Image: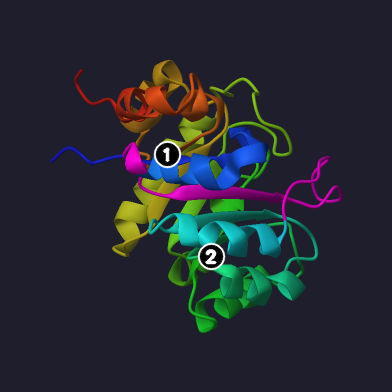
């Protein structure tokens, strides 16, 4: 049976002067999640948003907020993002000394827990925590900036993780983020991804184009 791929537009590529309108527009256009990239200028070389912005955007969409924390240390900020309205909270395997405890904390606070793997982090890194995660995020670029080129080397990792997830029997989503375009999306879908994060490709052309952008990323017919 063909897997229905979900699309998570990354608001990092939205018009920051009108974020609430942008979130409403991609929600109406057929997005499945709202992806929120949080960067601290330490774990990754960029700064983005904080929990106050997540809270301000929360009334603008009923979709799950998929919050990717590229910050370290991460544990002190998890409660603030869940309180702000994050539904899924994803942390990096390297973002703290006890990732198992971090994932437990997310779930104890009522969120879904995700683990992110950088391009240089092997698929095996998820093995000790598959019982604690609801989502595995493969970074197909080095995190920190939007608009980068997809790293085809990550397709092997996506396939390996698809096998691990299927074998464990738990309902874990496999998400891919970085350089996703209608062209690269086809290979990522084939490799077994459930969720595609797209910034530039989702928000290109303004609100009237968002529906078609999402359809093309999902691989739906015209």
Q: Residue at x 42, y 39 (%)?
A: 25
Q: Residue at x 54, y 31 (%)?
A: 154
Q: Is residue 194 visible?
A: no
- Of marks 2 and 1, the one in the foreground: 1
Expressed as whole percent of the image width and height from the top left, the position of residue 99 reads 66, 68
Q: Which residue is mark 2?
A: 86
Q: 74 or 123: which is nearer to us?
A: 74
Under circle 2, the secondary element is: loop
Measure how far apart labels 2 and 1 are at the Cα level.
19 Å
Expressed as whole percent of the image width and height from the top left, the position of residue 81 reads 63, 68
The reply, left or right, for residue 2 in relation to residue 217 is left
Q: Which residue is mark 1?
A: 25
Magenta span covers which residues? 28-49
Q: Is residue 193 visible?
A: yes
Is residue 39 covered in magenta? yes
Give the residue at the far right of this rendering.
42
Dot 2: within a 10 Å radius of its alpha carbon, few (fewer than 14), some, or many (20 or more) residues? many
Q: Residue at x 23, y 41 (%)?
A: 3
Under circle 1, the secondary element is: helix
The colour scheme applied to this rendered structure is rainbow
Expressed as whole percent of the image width and height from the top left, the position of residue 116 reads 59, 51
């Amino acid at each position: 049976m063909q897997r229905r791929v979900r699309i998570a537009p990354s608001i990092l590529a939205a018009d920051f002067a009108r974020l609430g309108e942008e979130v409403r527009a991609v929600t109406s256009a057929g997005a499945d999640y709202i992806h929120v990239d949080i960067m601290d200028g330490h774990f990754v070389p960029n700064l983005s948003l904080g929990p106050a912005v997540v809270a301000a955007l929360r009334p603008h969409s009923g979709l799950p907020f998929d919050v990717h924390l590229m910050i370290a240390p991460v544990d002190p900020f998890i409660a603030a993002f869940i309180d702000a309205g994050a539904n899924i909270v994803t942390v990096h395997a390297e973002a703290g000394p006890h990732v198992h405890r971090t994932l437990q904390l997310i779930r104890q606070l009522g969120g879904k827990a995700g683990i992110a793997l950088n391009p240089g982090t092997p698929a095996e890194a998820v093995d000790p925590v598959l019982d604690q995660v609801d989502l595995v995020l493969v970074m197909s670029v080095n995190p920190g900036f939007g608009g980068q080129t997809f790293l085809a080397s990550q397709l092997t990792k996506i396939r390996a993780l698809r096998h691990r997830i299927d074998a464990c029997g738990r309902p874990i989503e496999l998400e891919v983020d970085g350089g996703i375009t209608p062209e690269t999306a086809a290979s990522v879908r084939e490799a077994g991804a459930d969720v595609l994060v797209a910034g530039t490709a989702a928000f290109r052309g303004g609100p009237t184009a968002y529906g078609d952008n999402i359809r093309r990323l999902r691989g739906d017919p015209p």
